Amino acid sequence: MKIKLYLLAGLILICFFITNGFLAAKSSGPPVVKTPIIHSITPGSVITGKTLNVTIKGSGFREGNPVVRFYNISAGFNAVCNVVSDSQLTVTIPGKTAAGKYAVTVTNKKGTSKPVFFTVGTAVKLTSVNPRAGNAGWIVILRGRYIDLGGKPTVTFGGYPGKVISYSATKLYVTVPDKPKGKVKVTVNNSFGESNSIFFQVMKK
């Protein structure tokens, strides 16, 4: 009788350990997928027409087959992605990418990271100056595209620097310098190069 009881107790213990081991294994499940976080993008910009490999650092990159997206109000694309580790991946920016500021996100099965910004830059494209003639000290308005890319722009009138007052993506306010006289070329420079030139007539006081 005692032998039967011992055998029964042994079977109960074996079933207990097997059941609890199975439940523990089941409860552990697959690894938890974390929402990606972007800490930095290096380098933070590229000039148009140049293919560039960019390094993105953060966390949650290894899990869930991440998708890296670059987008703005007028364009967007998914970049070719190579996961180096959970905290680093590299992507390729195609040379045909249009100029502009892009929000960059990383998405996996858990969710999407907060955006970090990246610039595809180009030289300023000037379209007009208003007025087209004026005295030294006058404030004139330059209009064009990409004025706000590549840091604070500088403006020259016939090679002489004007004082930039304010600027946006399509408009720039600048003061006509004292030295230039007559019909001069006006250009805008940023970190991506020099713009096309437009003419301005500096009048005699």
Image (cartoon, rainbow, N blue to C red):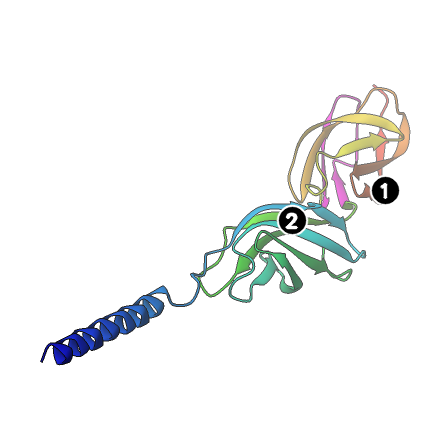
Q: In which quarter of the image is residue 44?
A: top right
Q: Is residue 120 magenta?
A: no
Instruction: Please name the amino acid that badge 1 sits on.
Output: Ser
Location of residue 47 in the rendering, given as x and y in whole percent from the top left corner: 78, 50
Say which residue appears at 31% left-offset and 69% top-offset. Answer: 21
Mark 2 or mark 1, which has the lower sequence index? 2
In this picture, which residue range is highlighted in magenta? Answer: 126-145
**Residue 127 lies in magenta, yes or no?**
yes
Q: Residue at x 79, y 43 (%)?
A: 192
| Quadrant hosting residue 185 | top right
Q: Name the foreground residue: 77 vs 63.
A: 63
Dominant secondary structure (helix, strand or loop) of the stretch shown in magenta: strand
Numbered disc in front, either 2 or 1? 2
Q: Nearer the viewer, residue 32 or 168?
A: 32
Left or right of residue 19: residue 81: right
Occupied quadrant, residue 128: top right
- In the image, is 168 to the left or to the right of 17? right
Q: Position of residue 14 (x, y in %)?
A: 25, 74
**Which residue position is annotated with label 1?**
197
Return the residue at label 2.
118
Percent across and percent down for residue 146 are: 71, 46
Q: Is residue 126 above or below residue 162?
A: below
Say which quadrant the N terminus sits in: bottom left
The residue positioned 51% from the left and 66% from the top of the image is 64
The amino acid marked with disc number 2 is Phe
Where in the figure is residue 43, as x and y percent of width and height? 71, 45
Distance from the alpha carbon under mark 2 to that under mark 1: 27 Å
Q: Is 110 left, or right, of 100 in this rendering? A: left
